[in-house]
Image (tube, rainbow, N blue to C red):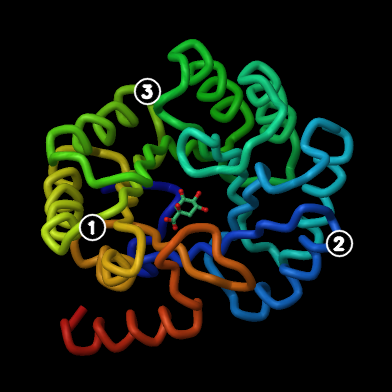
Amino acid sequence: MKSRWFNEEKLPYICTPLIGKNTDELIGELTSIVSKKPDVIEWRVDFYENIADFNEVLAAAQAIYENSDGIPILFTIRSDREGGESISLSEEDKVELISELCKSRFIAMVDYELSNEPSNIQRVREVSREHGKALVMSYHNFGCTPKKPEILKQILLAEFYGADVAKASVMPVDKQDVLTLLEVTREAVDMLTIPVLTISMGALGSMSRVMGWMYGSVMTFAVGANSSAPGQIPIDDLRQMIAMAKRFAGE
Ligand SMILES: O=C1C[C@@](O)(C(=O)O)C[C@@H](O)[C@@H]1O
């Protein structure tokens, strides 16, 4: 993997989400998150109640940028199909909003789901590339862990669309599912030229957040202030567990 977005010496990156529904809540979350020094902060914009007011979203993005001490911001509008909040924007509106954010200096990365129309994916790819933002193309399944070829297909699709990162987050129903996700991760790393980011969610999958990097996942999500998905571990605990694993795994 060669990527200008990740320094191999520092893997895995730790990302903490912001889920505030207004700017005050977001700044409150940031106050406790920034001192914990995550590598990336994800703004889950689908939680923002005035998401339809693009000027307000841009102002909130600026406030986040100015209060995040230089930590790169990942801009994510998670769809309700894939575990996000229900929002009033059409897909056209979302692409418009993403484009506005890509044109600003307030974000470094944007997440867009692989389940979207290819034409929208291409638009998001073009605008993010034009403005130097990394594109994370993502696949989520909150119901189950599909079979290996299906997860691999999604990850390969991300590379096909020209993503900078291929991401898959799936829910295990048994312990084998967690192993399946880790195996997919290892295989995908050999097949792809872009970084791979994978997660097995829920309590069963939480160990994948601690050791996914051993199988090649470049980033893991942790709780800074609030959790955005089941199984996320508080950042301080996660960092200690990773450090300990690295010590004993000799990495
Ligand atoms: O997609 C992801 C990963 C995630 O779902 C998780 O499992 O940690 C959390 C989300 O906020 C993020 O957008």
**Sequence-first disc among 2 and 3:** 2
The answer to which image quadrant residue 96 occupies is top right
Circle 2 packing at 10 Å, graded few (<14), some (14-19), many (20+), is few
Identify which residue is drawn at 66% across, 42% down. Answer: 46
- At which x and y percent is residue 152? 19, 36
Q: Is 232 drawn above or below residue 21 in the view shown? A: below
Q: Name the front one of labels 1 and 2.
A: 2
12 with respect to 75 (left or right): left
Asked if ligand 1 lies within 8 A of label 3, the reply is no
Say which residue label 2 marks.
Answer: 24
Q: Name the residue type under label 2.
A: Asp
At which x and y percent is residue 75?
62, 44
SS under mark 2: helix
Residue at the spot of label 1 = 216
Q: Mark 1 or 2 closer to N-term?
A: 2
Residue position for label 3: 161
Mark 2 and mark 3 in contact? Answer it, CB < 8 Å.
no
In-front residue for pair 81/92: 81
Label 1 neighbour load within 10 Å: few <14, some 14-19, many 20+: many
Q: How many marks?
A: 3
Image: 123 above or below 210? above
- Name the side, left or right, on which 63 lies relative to 95: right
Cα separation between marks 3 and 1: 21 Å
Q: Image height check: is 165 above or below 14? A: above
Q: Which residue is at a point 18% across and 88% down the rendered structure image?
A: 248
Task: Establish if 54 lies above or below 96.
Answer: below
* Quadrant for the C terminus in the image: bottom left
Say what amino acid the circle numbered 1 marks. Gly
Residue 120 position, x and y percent, is 53, 16
